[in-house]
Image (spheres, rainbow, N blue to C red):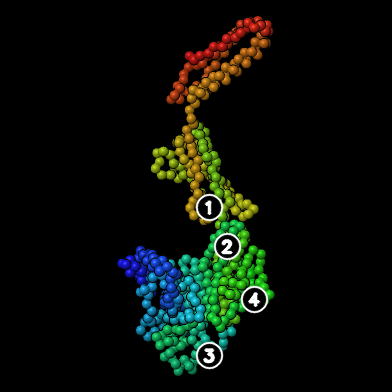
Amino acid sequence: MVLCGIAGLCGTAVPCRIPVLCGIAGLCGTLLALAAGSAPPFRKVDITLGCSYLGEDGGGLLRVFGGSTSEHPATLVLRAVSVRDDGNLDDVTEYKVPQENPDSSSPIVFEVSAQSVSIPHAESLLHADCDGEEVNCEISPYSSQGAGEGPHRPSWFMATLQLSSGISIALVLRGPHCCSREEEEEHDATLHPKLRIPMSKEGTVLTTVEFQSSSCNTSLRTHLGSSVTLDCHFALAPSSSISSLEWRRQHRGSGHSLFWYQVGSTGPAALPKVHVDVTGLLESGDASLNLQGVSMGDEGTYICLVSTPLYQAQHTIQLRVAEPPRVHMIPAVVSFERDVMTTLTCNIAGYYPLDVSVSWTQKTLEDEVEIPLSNVHFSSHRQSRDGTYSITSYLSISSATAQAPATYSCHVSHVALAEPISVSAQLKVPEQMGSEGLMGGFIATIIFVVVLFIVLRRRAGRSLKCWATFFMGEMQRGASSSPLHPLSGEMEVRISWEGQVGSGRAGDSFLLEGGMR
């Protein structure tokens, strides 16, 4: 009960600065919902966001492209927004407007009614501070298409909300009617000192949401050949209707249309590989674009532009292709040999984009941590037909400085990898040659001498005695270091034959003797 009493902290309009308590609050809310055995009910709350008001010069004129702009503090109050009550909203209170009379330096308070158009991602906005998210809010004047001219035209504003998690929201707000100069003079007390439009008794600007659009992400990363959905949703007031939807892609200074649909036309115009569900577009406001078989040429900035007869809003989504590298080490095992330079090869292939980080380390039995190495060489980048890149890294190991046994590792980092890839090669001391190896060499040598003796006997014309003495050479030197069979000295083999050359009698014989000395 004590923990659940903390739950209300995260639902207040006051920023929550205690992440541990916020986490407990979410846990309590989940437990309460599970205990109830049903989905959490909805509740209407006020969501208050700190914003910046942009787009007016000193004369109060609407911003135009290239004109002067100013920035002024503002507060966006979304009134009576419906959110799921997960048990964390007990202490949520209604927003109270400050009592002091506003002047030209006071923050502009925009009260927003969302009765006819729902606010997307309302829970994320309400709990943004508790979830550690930042919300960037900007409000600017908006020039509605054909919304009326003259002194009594309504005022329009665009509120753009950007969450650090990638959610973006655009709200088209309809404000009070503008006044003529005569009405300004007559009703000066009721005009906002900064915007020069009628304000409420509390000094706020009353607005309603006429149109909203949103996207779950402003940046996406995908793999080659995959399918990806670029999210774009919208909602309109009952008195409004969609007139068109367009998806465009811009990349490196050029752009072109991918999908175009005009309400009332026979059908959409779309390029291959792209698809928008027109039924979902018209019935539920789902304007998401599905892109199939992603290639390098699909990278760029995608723009979702939803239009009505009065206004339009757009969202931009950055699409990037990222392909992880394949890493292979050659050879995997290296035998330590004196006075020999060994080269390890680390092949990195199939990655995109180009930037890749490669490093080498060494670790022996005496090392507690891996030691970075610098005697590394690289090939040039190579690009394959599918657009991916490859590179090869080389590490030279000198027997004069290397210690065996040791582990040499190649580490590869890339934007497509959640963590670096590491492959290793083992530098081992060669196994010493034992008695089996010596005996095999001894027998092979005897056979060679016997064959040589027979050949010489056939060519000789007299009794022949042949002695062959040979020394173990490299075999002796390799065996002398063996802890199991130390050898020294020389080996002698004597072969003698008695009988008549070419007689072929059964009495002919030869004698084979050998030994160590």
Question: What is the count of numbered marks?
Answer: 4
Farthest residue, direction left: 2
| Quarter of the figure with residue 364 | top left
Q: Nearer the viewer, residue 514 or 292?
A: 292
Task: Name the kind of residue labelled 1 in the image.
Answer: Val
Farthest residue, direction front: 37
The residue where tag 2 is placed is: 228
User: In which quadrant is the N terminus drawn?
Assistant: bottom left
- Marks 1, 2: nearer the viewer: 2
Q: Mark 4 and 1 residues: CB-CB less than 8 Å, in contact? A: no
Task: Name the kind of residue labelled 4 in the image.
Answer: Gln
Distance between the Cα atoms at labels 3 and 4?
A: 33 Å
Residue 454 in percent (x, y) is at: 64, 13
Question: Which is nearer the N-term, disc 3 or disc 4?
Answer: 3
Q: Mark 3 and 4 residues: CB-CB less than 8 Å, in contact? A: no
- The circle on residue 356 is 1
Distance between the Cα atoms at labels 2 and 3?
A: 48 Å
Residue at disc 3, secondary structure: loop
The residue where tag 3 is placed is: 151
- The circle on residue 366 is none
- Marks 2, 3: nearer the viewer: 2
Task: Name the kind of residue labelled 3 in the image.
Answer: Pro
The residue where tag 4 is placed is: 262
- Marks 3, 4: nearer the viewer: 4
Q: Nearer the viewer, residue 420 or 113?
A: 113
Q: Residue placed at 34% from the left, 68% from the top?
A: 4
Residue 391 in percent (x, y) is at: 57, 48
